[in-house]
Amino acid sequence: MIFDSHAHYEDKQFGEDRDELLSSMRQKGITKIVEVGSSIESSKRAIALTERYDFIYAAIGVHPSDISCLNEEGLARLREMARHEKVVAIGEIGLDYYWDKEPEVQERQKAWFRRQLKLAREAGLPVIIHSRDAAEDTLTIMKEEAAGLPGVIHCFSYSKELALEYVKMGYYIGVGGVVTFKNARKLKEAVAELPIERIVIETDCPYLAPEPNRGKRNSSLNLPYVVEAIAGIKGLAPEAVEEITYRNAMELYGLA
Ligand code: NI
């Protein structure tokens, strides 16, 4: 049993075969998926997807690169969506300075990040954090706004020291296809240090397919490669990694 803690099946790359693919998941051992929104529109679609598949849950939120779609009205829409029975998290939210280098844009990202963390607290939901090239500001804001709030640092890309710092704060660390890449030394080191009880697995599909399918469209069906890589690093049986990370994700999203 595998839990994909972060997927984007509403992406247009799944336009041709979405239903066929999702209908095949259960018999291939993928028994739970969280569909993650990144804008108001994709959050709405994530909820609609959960209404078609009982094993799919939704996260709703606006990605830092999509905040131009956010205003007070948009935030009110999110607040309303957060009450849906299959919404299990607020996300993905955070900071991304890789694409946005202008200080003014970064200030806007920070402001909406804070507002959405507050929304998660109000709604009593965990958070899914996206953070790229913004390690310091993310940690500062998390310390100020997110103390005691459960959640996951998704597609973790920073140092092992920072991973352990987030674990100390009570967070889970999301590990996906990158852990199978030859050049992913930093992430492999972090996985080696992290307690397995704090790791959840994810695809971030259609992106970040693991080896040997790197560069192709990703899906939850590739997760056994991620499980195998983590098992190798931790010296555990793949079945144990599957079972523990499944339990972790159930706990993270309040499904346990
Ligand atoms: Ni994502």
Image (tube, helix red, strand yellow):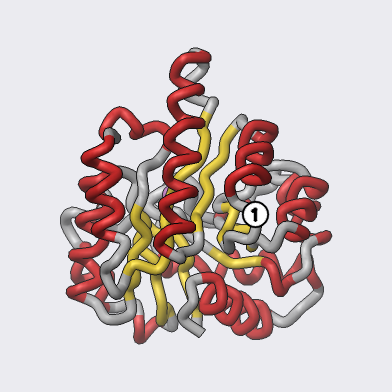
Q: Is residue 179 left or right of residue 250?
A: right
Q: Is residue 133 left or right of residue 122?
A: right
Given residues 93 and 140, the one toward you in this image is: 140
Q: In the picture shown, does residue 13 fall above or below 229?
A: above
Q: Quadrant of residue 55?
A: bottom left
Q: Residue furthest front?
A: 122
Query: Can you identify the residue that label 1 sits on?
Result: 147
Q: Residue at x 40, y 54 (%)?
A: 205
Report how many numbered discs are placed on residues in the image: 1
Circle 1 Cα neighbour tier, 10 Å, few/some/many (<14 / 14–19 / ≥20): few
Q: Residue at x 43, y 62 (%)?
A: 89
Residue 145 on image: x %, y %: 58, 46
Q: Amino acid at mark 1?
A: Ala
Given residues 222 and 141, the one toward you in this image is: 141
Residue 234 on image: x %, y %: 79, 70
Q: Is residue 17 left or right of residue 178?
A: left
Q: In the picture shown, does residue 160 fall above or below 23?
A: above
Given residues 195 and 78, the one toward you in this image is: 78
Q: In the picture shown, does residue 221 fall above or below 121?
A: below
Q: Residue at x 50, y 22 (%)?
A: 106
Given residues 132 and 64, the one toward you in this image is: 64
Residue 50 on image: x %, y %: 25, 71
Q: Quadrant of residue 9?
A: bottom left
Q: Quadrant of residue 32?
A: bottom left
Please tell me whether mark 1 sits on a helix, a strand or a loop: loop
Q: Residue at x 57, y 35 (%)?
A: 132
